[in-house]
Amino acid sequence: MMQIAEFLPITPSPVWRLAQQAGVQHAVGGLPFDPDGNLSREIEPLREMQAAYEAGGFRLAVIEARPPLNKAKRGLPGRDDEIDTACALIENMGRLGIPVWCYEWMTDFNWLRTEFARPSRGGSVVTAFDYAAMRDQPNTELGPISEDELWENLAYFLRRVLPVAEKAGVKLAMHPDDPPLSPIRGVGRIMRSVENFQRLLDLAPSPMNGITMCQGNFTLMTDDLPQAIRQFGRQNKLFFVHFRDVRGTPESFEETWHDDGKTDMLACMKAYSEINFDGVLRPDHVPTVDGDSNTNAGYSAFGRLYAIGYIRGLQQAVYS
């Protein structure tokens, strides 16, 4: 049966306490970077981080952070050193029994929004994206890169890391591009369609090569999200789920409350049940409500409680 988790910072915080009070027992964690943003290849910092989660009452089930990988994504000199660090991370995760690494292939920048406080239900605020607001922005500092180049560099990366992941028993769960739109500022984006995710799986057949089903992105790729869940689930390729929703198109959308978007969330939960998904699912990108801070838009504390309760209700309705 699937496990409901929360994304928790690597040091105890009020969100830890709220998650405990909501009955969450699994953590999706970050990484113990040094002050310069680098990750040690030694196991001890990761071991200490895992121990901190366990002392707080959580099993660390997914790592959702990455060491620097932009040279690897662009095929630049120094990429092998970056990949060596990723391999060390995977090996250390295997030694510690941390089963899933959520990574992505977004070059130069990660998830994008053009608005971080769009009014939503009852005066809450959400994030939003409108490509028209950034259409005229210049290319990134490193210049354009094509989708073909990104595919070539991804294939090189997977050839290096998948044998390590297979030996370590760690699943690699690719997150979609957010937004699933290409190009942006001259940069191609390849993880942006159901067909391209199937291409990823076919590119490197391995039991450790799979998907983070981020529903907010996938529902912008297809009008039948439950079918996409079944398609990848029947291949045993769904390793991790972000349960969230949006309203709009890849060019213009806004985040929504979990019960107020374009997706039939109950049908999605039924699809996970049909494929016997037994991994970790976490809420993602929640609204900010009265009494909470929007400093980290999409990850406010109180909105998570509503999301956890909504997801648990759907889970009990389906799985009972």
Image: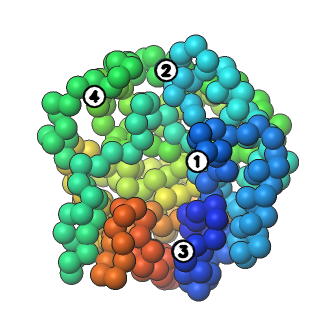
Q: Tell me the SS state at disc 2.
A: helix
Give 133 or 268, whichever is nearer the viewer: 133
Q: Residues within 10 Å of mark 3 (few under 14, many from 20)?
A: some
Q: Residue at x 21, y 71 (%)?
A: 120
Amino acid bearing label 4: Arg
* Residue placed under numbered mark 1 in the picture: 65
Quadrant into which the C terminus falls: bottom right
Instruction: Find residue 185 and name its label.
Output: 4
Q: Earlier in the sequence, mark 2 or mark 4?
A: 2
Is residue 280 depicted above or below 18 in this figure?
Answer: above
- Disc 3/disc 1 C-alpha distance (Å): 18 Å
Indicate whether 190 appears above or below 265: above
Image label count: 4
> Which residue in the structure is indicated by mark 3?
15
Numbered badge on residue 74: 2
Q: Are marks 1 and 4 in contact (CB under 8 Å)?
A: no
- The residues bearing labels 1 and 2 have C-alpha atoms spaced at a distance of 19 Å
Crowdedness near tag 1: few (<14), some (14–19) or many (≥20) residues, C-alpha within 10 Å? some
The amino acid on which the numbered mark 1 sits, given as a three-letter code, is Ala
Q: Give whichever of discs 1 and 2 has the lower sequence position.
A: 1
Q: Amino acid at mark 3?
A: Val
Q: Position of residue 133 (x, y in %)?
A: 15, 42
How far is disc 1 from disc 4 in space, using C-alphas? Answer: 24 Å
Q: Is residue 205 visible?
A: yes
Q: CA distance from mark 3 to mark 2?
A: 36 Å
Residue at x 74%, y 45% (from the top left corner): 170
